[in-house]
Amino acid sequence: MPLSDREIWMKLEAGSLVIDPMPDVTQVGPASIDLCLGAIVHLFKDVPPGFGPIRLKEASPTRIVDFVTETWDLRARPLTLNRGDFAIGYTNEDVQLPTHLSARVEGRSGFARLGLTIHNTAPTIHPGFRGKIALELHNNGHMALQLEPGIIICQLIIENLGRPAAAGYSGVFQNQSGPTS
């Protein structure tokens, strides 16, 4: 069951849920926390002609840097995400979940109505996760969209587990701050 705003504030104030920088009162909604887009975005390049299919059985998500064309620092210049473009962005905030909480990252309805997807199929943030949350940014709309650092890009829904997880997350994306190689 998702935590309410009151429960979110209790966890933040007790230090069991850590979000850095700490959200202000305008970022905590009735059952979610608004998070901002960080400064670095990685835009995927078009696949060159004749490039074979990626065998998912052998693909390594940690080799993402091999597939990005350009790293954008949005502080220097905004990124225009054209129709069909796909990029990986990260939240400005670092999130740290204890073993008794999990979370989901979701898009914002106003941006969704413009065609912006925040995640493809990976909204889950496991108990014990620490780091910036990766955002799978895809423009499914008919207009180009401009990405700038600091915009409220997504919402985090925090959920209480019935019992703490036996072990917290310890996968390859632990402590991520950008693409893992």
Image (spheres, grey):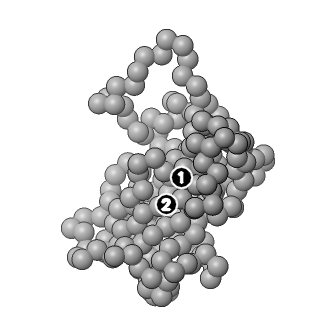
Residue 95 in the image: x percent, y percent? 49, 66
Regarding residue 48, the answer to whether it shows in the image is yes
Classify 136 as above or below 123. above
* Image-based side of 125 in relation to 21, left or right: left
Residue under numbered circle 2: 106
Residue 89 in the image: x percent, y percent? 58, 49
Place residue 44 in its image quadrant: top right
Q: Residue at x 29, y 30 (%)?
A: 57
Regarding residue 93, the answer to whether it shows in the image is no
Residue 119 in the image: x percent, y percent? 48, 51
Question: Which quadrant does the N terminus fall into?
Answer: bottom left
State the SS at label 2: strand
Which class describes the residues within 10 Å of circle 1: few (<14), some (14-19), or many (20+)? many
Q: Residue at x 53, y 52 (%)?
A: 118
Classify 39 as above or below 24. above
Q: Nearer the viewer, residue 12 or 84?
A: 84
Q: CA distance from mark 1 to mark 2?
A: 7 Å
Residue type pointed to by label 2: Glu
Place residue 168 in its image quadrant: bottom left
Mark identifier at residue 165: none
Residue type pointed to by label 1: Ile
Mark sitting earlier along the chain (1/2): 2
Classify 161 as above or below 64. below
Classify 84 as above or below 117. above
Residue under numbered circle 1: 118
Q: Residue at x 41, y 39 (%)?
A: 61
Tally of numbered discs: 2
Residue 128 in the image: x percent, y percent? 35, 66
Q: Are marks 1 and 2 in contact (CB under 8 Å)?
A: yes
* Image-based side of 157 in relation to 99, left or right: right
